[in-house]
Amino acid sequence: MVTVGLVTPRALPRFPLLVALRQEPRLRVVFEVHDLRHLAALAQKEPPSVLVADMDMGVGVRTLMQALKARFPGVPVVLLDRAADAARAQRARNLGAAAVISRRSRPERFVARVLDVAYRHMDEGLLPRWQLYERLTPREWDILPYLAQRYSAREIAAELTLSYATVRTHIRNIYAKCGVGSRQQAARVAAYLLAERAGQDNYTGKEVAADAKRGRDGRSDP
């Protein structure tokens, strides 16, 4: 899950771009402040994956970037620009902004840009998980909850009203994308991805453990 810290004027919370950001399942807003002086209160918080800040915070661009970098060193900053001033945007990039986006941008473009910035700055050890998250198809996501509970291919086919052959193909694709070879491994990865998608960063494997009552033996069953 890409975590986002918001630094915006108080008048912006219902702004369409920020609404789209909050509704995007791959993003989770972990804090929102409307005054740079409140950044000090976030000293104990885990740094977000990316900061989204408005350029109109009552200070100059240099002061804004200095405040953000001092509190969250190394965290990429995406700036929202109301004025669409090319010179100011370039100055912000020169000061270290990862991206400058107009407030008039389409919501889907804005969300895609925030994700792109976060992925480009993410620790390389985490990239395979995010690439996997992006590669799964909608139908594979439909099947994941059943894999997490160790349903067999025939049981999944019955639940989703699909043919057995179709489900087997989807499961094989999931196994290949997840790099697993058994039902037990697939159940753990599926439960983990579902928890990530729901914004639950504290997955402990309970979904799989609770399913032990169903008597699944963990054998490969694509």
Image (tube, rainbow, N blue to C red):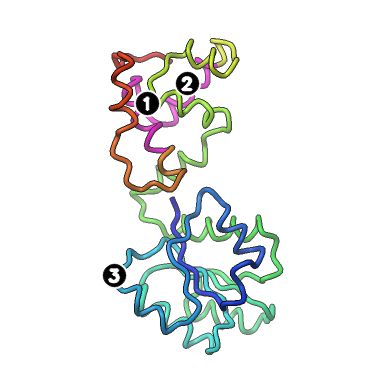
Q: Say which residue label 1 marks.
A: 186
Q: Position of residue 191 (x, y in %)?
A: 38, 33
Kind of residue at disc 1: Ala
Residue at (50%, 78%) from the top-left corner? Answer: 34
Q: Say which residue label 2 marks.
A: 171
Q: Position of residue 63 (x, y in %)?
A: 47, 88
Q: Position of residue 179 (x, y in %)?
A: 37, 29
Q: Nearer the viewer, residue 86 or 25?
A: 25
Q: CA distance from mark 3 to mark 1?
A: 36 Å
Q: What is the crowding at mark 3: few (fewer than 14 residues within 10 Å), some, or many (at least 20)?
A: few
User: Could you tell me which quadrant the C terminus lies in?
Assistant: top left
Which secondary structure, mark 2?
A: helix
Kind of residue at disc 3: Gln
Q: Is 168 inside the magenta-drawn segment?
A: yes
Point out the tag, 3 or 2, that comes first from the N-terminus.
3
Q: How many marks?
A: 3
Residue at (59%, 72%) from the top-left corner? Answer: 100
Point out the tag, 1 or 2, that comes first from the N-terminus.
2
Q: Nearer the viewer, mark 3 or mark 1?
A: 3
Q: Say which residue label 3 marks.
A: 44
Q: Nearer the viewer, residue 45 or 61?
A: 45
Which secondary structure, mark 3?
A: loop
For the residues bearing labels 3 and 2, Cβ distance under 8 angstroms: no
Q: Nearer the viewer, residue 112 or 139?
A: 139
Which secondary structure, mark 1?
A: helix
Q: Position of residue 1 (x, y in %)?
A: 43, 50
Kind of residue at disc 2: Ile
Q: What range of the chain is rendered magenta?
A: 167-193
Please say if 21 is above or below 167.
below
For the residues bearing labels 1 and 2, Cβ distance under 8 angstroms: yes
